[in-house]
Image (tube, rainbow, N blue to C red):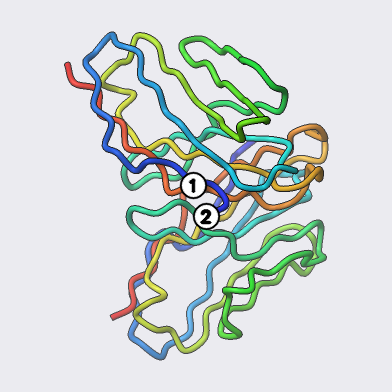
Amino acid sequence: DTGVSQDPRHKITKRGQNVTFRCDPISEHNRLYWYRQTLGQGPEFLTYFQNEAQLEKSRLLSDRFSAERPKGSFSTLEIQRTEQGDSAMYLCASSSPRRLLTGELFFGEGSRLTVL
Amino acid sequence: QKEVEQNSGPLSVPEGAIASLNCTYSDRGSQSFFWYRQYSGKSPELIMFIYSNGDKEDGRFTAQLNKASQYVSLLIRDSQPSDSATYLCAARLGSSNTGKLIFGQGTTLQVKP
């Protein structure tokens, strides 16, 4: 069990550029979640997959954001035409199908985005 | 009203004291609740979960749930400086065990030697 892995850990980009983050969940975890966290706030839900199906997407998420999980394993989160307000920590989490009662989430170390 | 609310603090306690962290939630249908610890610049780490009314103990940590009052708390006994962190309360809305967690803004705990 190697934990949830995210890449890159840090990304600095200029406003208007596109960025992509990758998340590799814990193996055999079938659910994968993306959250965004800004300083002094708790993680804010973005979207969630069960296997390859995207089951829920936050209404707060603009259409510049898109996430995929094509084979039900790793996931990517792309932000197009970045804005300074997109600067945040992007957290990925996964949960196990064997934890049927509670479904707790295990987080990766996050990808920190700075938009200049 | 936010779905999960916490006092942002900071909560300051002396070393060895009991730290009490509180959380309220708005959705009466919420079934399971989680406490995560987050050190500065790091990702959230699960401490405990609770889904039944009453207390659940794990080492120095006790989670308490009162569904009638829509209230969750975390007690940390014998607080240590290493417990200084932000504590995030989270709720899973509804009866599903697979949906998203909704997080509060977190309470910053400072344990002073």
Q: Nearer the viewer, residue B35 or A5?
A: B35
Quarter of the figure that contains the C terminus of chain B:
top left
Chain under label 2? B
Question: Whole-percent x and y of residue A37?
Answer: 44, 58
Q: Is residue A15 above or below residue B10?
A: below
Residue pushed farthest left?
B113
What is the C-alpha distance between the residues marked 2 and 1?
8 Å
Tell which circle, 2 or 1, labels the residue nearer the N-terminal end. 2
Residue at 30% across, 28% down: B84
Mark 2 belongs to which amino acid? Lys
User: Residue B104 has which mark?
Assistant: 1
Question: Whole-percent x and y of residue B76?
Answer: 41, 17
Residue at 33% across, 85% down: A14
Residue at 37% across, 41% down: B7
The mark lying in front, picked from 2 and 1, is 2
Q: Is residue A11 above or below residue B76?
A: below
Q: Residues within 10 Å of mark 1 (few under 14, many from 20)?
A: many
Residue at 30% across, 16% down: B80
Chain under label 1? B
The residue that mark 2 highlights is B2
Kindly check if marks 2 and 1 are in contact, taking CB atoms under 8 A apart as contact: yes
Dot 1 falls on a residue whose secondary structure is loop
Q: Is residue B42 left or right of residue B65?
A: left
